[in-house]
Amino acid sequence: MKSIVVACSNCGTKNRIPADKQHLGPKCGKCKAPLSLSAAAVPVELDDSTFSGFTSRASKPVLVDFFSPTCGPCRLLAPTIDTMARKFYGRVIIAKLDTSRNHITAAQYRIKGVPTLLFFKNGKLVDQVTGALPEQELTRLLEEFAE
């Protein structure tokens, strides 16, 4: 499980935040001040055991990137997905799921090609896009999705 280390802007203490908890409004362990993660946010890594619960309980819209590490277009899209996690922090939760290791969820959503992006609101699938989108197009989609 990935984690992020963020220094508190109030007291300077370094705080380790699990990536899958970054959207829950973390606070400094020492002074309890809210931590700003907008510059450090990363996509949440999901798997077959965490996907359903995470997307259904998320307090914000969720974008899930279904990818494979051996897929060329997926590797091209990965830096854009990382950028979107920071750019939309606090508005949209960006997550990813490796289809080569998580066949059950990929089959459940009938993922035939990667990269495929699924958009969830209130636990329900609301949109799906297949292919590596340019950063401007993905930004436009996420702006609409975040409303």
Image (cartoon, rainbow, N blue to C red):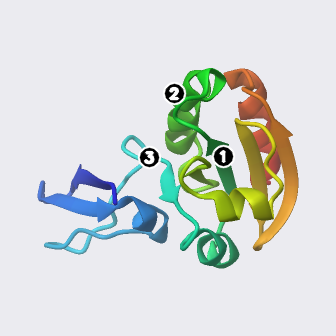
What amino acid type is highlighted by mark number 2? Pro
What amino acid type is highlighted by mark number 3? Val
Asked whether residue 9 is in view, the answer is no
Instruction: Please tell me which residue is depicted at 19% across the width and 73% down the height of the picture.
Output: 29
- What percent of the width, then of the height, locates residue 73? 65, 23
Kindly report the distance in space between the C-alpha atoms of the residues bearing marks 2 and 1: 14 Å
**Above or below, 110 relative to 32:** above
- What percent of the width, then of the height, locates residue 132? 72, 26
Tell which of 18 and 50 is nearer to you: 50
Which quadrant would the C terminus be assigned to in this image?
bottom right
Give the number of callouts: 3
Kindly report the distance in space between the C-alpha atoms of the residues bearing marks 2 and 3: 11 Å
Q: Which residue is mark 2?
A: 79
Is the residue under label 3 in contact with that under label 2 (CB below 8 Å)? no
Label 2 vs 3, first from the N-terminus = 3
Instruction: Please tell me which residue is depicted at 70% across the width and 35% down the height of the picture.
Output: 115
- What percent of the width, then of the height, locates residue 45? 48, 55
User: Position of 21 compared to 9: left or right?
Assistant: right
Foreground disc of the pair 3, 1: 1
Callout 1: helix, strand or loop?
Answer: strand
Dot 1 surroundings within 10 Å: few (below 14), some, or many (20 or more)?
many
- What percent of the width, then of the height, locates residue 6? 24, 52
Instruction: Please tell me which residue is depicted at 57% across the width and 36% down the height of the picture.
Output: 81
Label drawn at residue 27: none
Is the residue under label 1 in contact with that under label 3 (CB below 8 Å)? no
Q: Which residue is mark 3?
A: 42
Is the residue under label 1 in contact with that under label 2 (CB below 8 Å)? no
Label drawn at residue 66: 1
